[in-house]
């Protein structure tokens, strides 16, 4: 080989080597951030010229590179596939590969219970008991029922599918707590009912490759819950006949969570009750956090259901385990407010004051039981009574807007006027032509919902809008704050200081939006239609 050709070959080899080792670093800048590990990937760290910043930057940069290294997902998926298919081991510490195709979650809450390496201390058991007793007694004194329901982990119901080497001996923390509480009217653990329904003739109670129970398992939990509640609300939905639904027949169903975590996503056969549920009772409707609470605003974090012909309001604090219970439970009551959170005393007391329920339910998955509630309810209530973070007008406006979301609120057209009725009581009456309550400047559709932007005021009556009500047909679907920002252009055009802070912009999430939306500006018992843009 000539010297010139040899140099060319060496140059090509060197360039190829540099390209090969550079590709992973180059491609990580174009990563979409998606991952199968059910966690948030590290973000690029900011440089702070301080002792702490200089010490933490290398560690944070290392975490960023590790999470976004080019072809990372390809290599991890290949590793997980080989580990599971060849050695029947999980490629992630978050999942335990059990017998057959059974997978079990192995997080900070469940692994210690599986191995029986965690125990509640005496103080923790006392705090659990005192916190639950405080909530039960405080609510009972107001004529409100209270139930605390546990969603059992899969390993509690199907321990026979766990690898023998990870199973410890002795009681789990749930068993410890249940024994310490003794017989109570408020604590519900459906574990024994679930175990009793593990016969060969029944559907699976849990998905093999997901952390959650199946619709059939959720139904067994629902039955235990309703048996505990008892009269005057027996089962509104009772059915023991379920049919299988193959993956090919399922719509909008993603792969199971633990199959994604081990990077071998599957969609399992599920079960559907043969007796149809009333769809009207399971439609997600808007609900509101208490005034001043900064909580997640994605639709699943807080919503309500309403069921025609039923009465009563129930407040449910829950996690994802209750998702499969909701279709059954919502059939029982006029309005059910579902809040996805573990409530501390503050949010519990304020949500109860706002919703005025006849029953409060707390549901927690077993693996979150390690988080012990504080027995500080009465101290919190005393503090709330002395706190003055909002004016009386702000409190009244929030209370009034929440009334429009009630189960029995209807929008009735009568002789050219629109009335908002709650049972036999009129909340507000709207009159005037389109635009009497302001105008919509823009309607923007996004992946998460529809955003309405414009200004609102009751011009004919010279009143500022306290809030805005969105309707569809004869139902209120959304309430939103008004006076959010300055609209000097509107105030100047109409020569009215009233309109200086008349601007608004709010989104109706996809879960709550409906066709033919109409908006109204509301002040007291008066309302006026907001002009909609011409398509």
Image: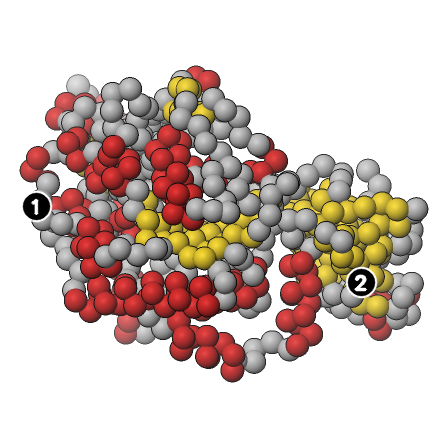
Q: Which residue is mark 1?
A: 169
Q: Circle 1 sits in a helix, a strand or a loop, which is it?
A: loop
* Displayed quadrant of residue 122: bottom left
Residue 179 point in image, percent of width and height: 19, 55
Answer left or right for 301 relative to 202. right
Q: Quadrant of residue 84?
A: top left
Query: Any mark on residue 525, and which?
Result: 2
Q: Residue at x 49, y 34 (%)?
A: 237
Q: Earlier in the sequence, mark 1 or mark 2?
A: 1
Q: Is residue 494 visible?
A: yes
Residue in front for this viewpoint, 344 or 275 = 275
Whether residue 68 appears in this view of the structure is no
The C terminus, quarter of image = top right
Residue at the image position 56 percent from the left and 78 percent from the top: 389
* Outermost residue to the bottom: 386
Q: Residue at x 21, y 34 (%)?
A: 158
Q: Nearer the viewer, residue 224 or 101?
A: 224
Mark 1 Cα within 10 Å, few/some/many (few <14, many 20+)? few
Question: In this figure, what is the number of numbered marks?
Answer: 2
Viewer-closest of 503 and 287: 287
Residue 317: where, in percent of width, then height?
44, 53
Where 377 sits versus 426, above or below?
below
Lateral position of residue 111 relative to residue 197, left or right: left
């Amino acid at each position: 080989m000539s010297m010139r050709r040899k140099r060319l070959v060496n140059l090509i080899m060197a360039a190829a080597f540099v390209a090969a080792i550079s590709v992973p670093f180059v491609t990580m800048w174009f990563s979409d951030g998606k991952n199968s590990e059910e966690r948030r990937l590290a973000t690029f760290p900011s440089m702070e010229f301080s002792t702490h910043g200089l010490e933490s930057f290398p560690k944070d940069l290392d975490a960023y590179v590790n999470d976004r290294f080019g072809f990372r997902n390809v290599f991890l998926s290949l590793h997980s596939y080989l580990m599971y298919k060849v050695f029947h081991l999980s490629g992630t510490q978050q999942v335990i590969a059990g017998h057959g195709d059974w997978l079990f979650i192995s997080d900070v809450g469940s692994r210690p219970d599986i191995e029986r390496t965690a125990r509640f201390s005496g103080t923790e058991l006392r705090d659990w008991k005192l916190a639950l007793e405080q909530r039960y007694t405080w609510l009972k004194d107001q004529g409100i029922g209270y139930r605390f329901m546990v969603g059992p982990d899969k390993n509690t119901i199907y321990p026979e599918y766990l690898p023998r080497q990870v199973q410890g001996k002795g009681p789990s923390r749930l068993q410890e707590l249940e024994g310490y509480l003794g017989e109570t009217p408020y604590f519900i653990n459906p574990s024994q009912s679930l175990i009793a329904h593990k016969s060969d003739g029944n559907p699976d109670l849990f998905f093999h490759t997901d952390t959650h129970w199946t619709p059939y398992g959720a139904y067994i939990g629902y039955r235990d819950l309703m048996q505990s509640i008892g009269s005057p609300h027996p089962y509104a939905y009772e059915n023991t006949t379920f049919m299988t639904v193959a993956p090919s027949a399922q719509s909008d169903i993603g792969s199971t969570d633990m199959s994604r975590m081990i990077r071998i996503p599957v969609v399992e056969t599920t079960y559907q009750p043969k007796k149809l549920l009333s769809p009207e009772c399971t439609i997600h409707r808007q609900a509101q956090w208490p005034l001043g609470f900064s909580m997640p605003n994605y639709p699943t974090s807080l919503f309500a259901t309403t069921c025609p012909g039923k009465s009563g309001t129930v407040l449910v604090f829950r996690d994802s385990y209750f998702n499969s219970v909701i279709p059954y439970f919502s059939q029982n009551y006029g309005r059910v407010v579902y809040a996805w959170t573990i409530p501390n005393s503050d949010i519990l007391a304020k949500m109860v004051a706002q919703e005025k329920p006849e029953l409060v339910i707390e549901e927690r998955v077993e693996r979150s039981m390690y988080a012990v509630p504080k027995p500080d309810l009465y101290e919190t209530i005393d503090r709330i009574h002395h706190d003055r973070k909002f004016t009386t007008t702000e409190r009244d406006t929030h209370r009034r807007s929440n009334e429009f979301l009630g189960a029995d609120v209807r929008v009735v057209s009568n002789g050219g006027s629109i009335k908002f009725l709650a049972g036999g009581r009129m909340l507000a009456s709207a009159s005037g032509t389109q635009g009497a309550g302001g105008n919509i400047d823009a309607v923007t559709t996004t992946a998460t919902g529809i955003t309405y932007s414009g200004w609102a005021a009751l011009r004919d009556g010279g009143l500022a809008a306290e809030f805005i009500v969105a309707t569809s047909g004869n139902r209120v679907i959304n309430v939103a704050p008004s006076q959010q920002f300055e609209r000097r252009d509107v105030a100047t055009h109409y020569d009215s200081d009233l309109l200086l802070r008349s601007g608004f912009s709010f989104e109706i999430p996809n879960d709550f939006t409906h066709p033919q939306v109409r908006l109204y500006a509301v002040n007291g018992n008066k309302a006026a239609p907001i002009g909609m843009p011409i398509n």
